Image (cartoon, rainbow, N blue to C red):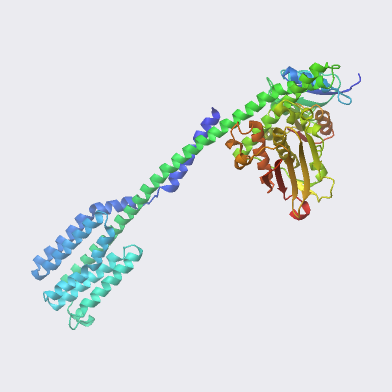
Amino acid sequence: MSNLTLGDNKQDTLSSDITNDLLVKYDGIEESKRILKIGLPIIGLTTLFIFVSIIVTDQSQYMIVASISFVLLFVEYMLATRGHVIVASYIVSLTPSVMIAYSYVYYLDFTDEISVLYAFWLSIFFSALFLPGIHYVISLVLTLLTIAFTLQFIEGFTVAQYIEHFDLLFTFSLAVMFATSLFFGRHLMSKLLIQEVEKKNKANKILLAKTQAMEKVRAEAELASKNKSIFLASVSHELRTPLNGIINFSGFLKNGKFGEVAPQHSHMIERIYDSGHELLKLINNVLDSSKIASGSFMLFYEDDITVEDLFDGFDKIDNFKILTTNIKGQSIAETGIDYYLNGTGETYPLLKLDIDRIRQALFEILMLCFYYTTSGFVSMDVTQSATSLIINIEDSSGSELDDIMPDLFDFTKLSTSEIVFHIGLGLSIAKEIIDLHNGTITYNHKEKGNLFQIKLPVLKEHSA
Amino acid sequence: MNHPFVCVYFEDNADARLILDMIFPISDMRLVTYEDSSSFFDKIERVEGKIVCFILDIHIPPHDGFEMLKMLKKDAQYSEIPVIALTASVTKDEVELLRSAGFNGAMSKPVDVDLFPKVVKKILEGQIVWAIG
């Protein structure tokens, strides 16, 4: 249980790390929200101040300009607070052009035109300044173009004339306009920022939920895999303990440690001994297959292996009859199958490979051939190409494995009716061993039986 | 006594003890077996003859193989004597634990009776042998 608890804690820590990574934290977001909240009252008050100034100074001709300004600001605010920040910003940038066009159409006093123009020109410059990236550039270009276009219709416009017609009220109004637009720009920027942050956080929350769900599935799978490993380790331990007695006690009897055994007992004792070894091999294969499944199946390469080392003991059927016999409960000697090993006497370069694993692989394939062969022969021929050791394993079984060939080396796809479990398991391990050596195994059905060809690029003088 | 040297074997499984009894003597070594690890040092000190190696089962009460190994390696009198693990736990993780614990070698159960004497001799010569199969 302590392991489980540890696992859960680990998961919690991981999730909280993900949360910290994903959620955007912006320190100014609260300030921005506050500005938004008081934005409308301030804009309203500023515009009201302009109206009052106009009335007090009795310059009623500005009333319409101020009204349009108010309406536009309000529309912009409404748009901005409802998510159309960019649209609102473009309206701000086009406001001065509208104002100038209005002034021109109604033939206002020249001074007024200049002042209104100047006020809005500045206001747009500063409000547009707060637009993000490319929108700022577009808005500014649009504004300058429309102003330049409108100025063509104002006769005799010069900077000197503006200075000459300096007006205190307008300068003051201009300052207020300037402050308002600056504020409005800040306001738009805040709104935009909040929207972006919230949008990002919303997306990240979905992502976070997905990540957490995936993490949960992963943790569950990990736990299941861990439990499976613990189970397999226990099964292996619990089977090996009694096998110690079965194999060794029958071995002592078989070898006459307690005196000669009667012939009718001798066969049974041998069967106990052989079956014990078969079970042990099966347990080892189950553990190997579990390692393959978890990707922890490792090779231990050795240098300078000779072909004689590799095939040591493979020359005599007696040396591995223990296992082949058990497939059918009948010794190969009794079935009369011949067995040959050819080609190991030739000269070969030294090999670099995991000798125990390659021997295991060869063994498994021979097992398959002996399984299918009822009479005739099984043979193993060793040759070489420029880079590889080539091993042909052939039998006279007459069986056709073509139907199951695509799945022959993947025991999970073989049904027990097609092939016995432990042979299927052994073949998939053999395939893995050959693959890990960058070798290949191919199958051909021949007229009289099966032919497996194994190519191993393990010749040392070529592989350096 | 013909066999002046002693291997001490701690093993709770009677079959396993009997099997090693059958394998010994190896050269001039005889085997002394104990079926649990209680009063650990009392048991060792009771052994007659010179102890040249310990063979430890791993899953044995009350002190498991790892604890016995620790006790031996801490004791000046025994710290230089090779300790062999004899275990039916042979998965990669379990073998890794044996290696990192500091055993001088390990053999798996079922015991390979032909290989066993060779492995013990190699370990006594100072080699570290992992005969897990």
Rendered location of residue A325, percent (x, y)? 74, 28
Rendered location of residue A242, percent (x, y)? 70, 21
The residue depicted at 28 percent of the width and 66 percent of the height is: A126
Q: Nearer the viewer, residue A216 or A192?
A: A216
Q: Nearer the viewer, residue B90 or A280?
A: A280
Rendered location of residue A219, percent (x, y)? 50, 36
Quarter occupied by the C terminus of chain B: top right
Q: Nearer the viewer, residue A266 or A259?
A: A266
Give the quadrant of residue B53.
top right
Q: Residue furthest front?
A: A447
Give the quadrant of residue B6.
top right
Relative side of B72 to A237, left or right: right
Give the quadrant of residue B45.
top right
Residue B81 seen in this snapshot: no
Give the vertical position of A462 relative to B60 (above or below): below
Q: Residue furthest bottom?
A: A156
Q: How many marks?
A: 0
The residue depicted at 21 percent of the width and 67 percent of the height is: A95
Give the vertical position of A387 relative to B20 (above or below): below
Residue A104 seen in this snapshot: yes
Quarter occupied by the N terminus of chain B: top right
Relative side of A235 to B56, left or right: left
Relative side of A15 to A267, left or right: left
Rendered location of residue A463, percent (x, y)? 74, 54
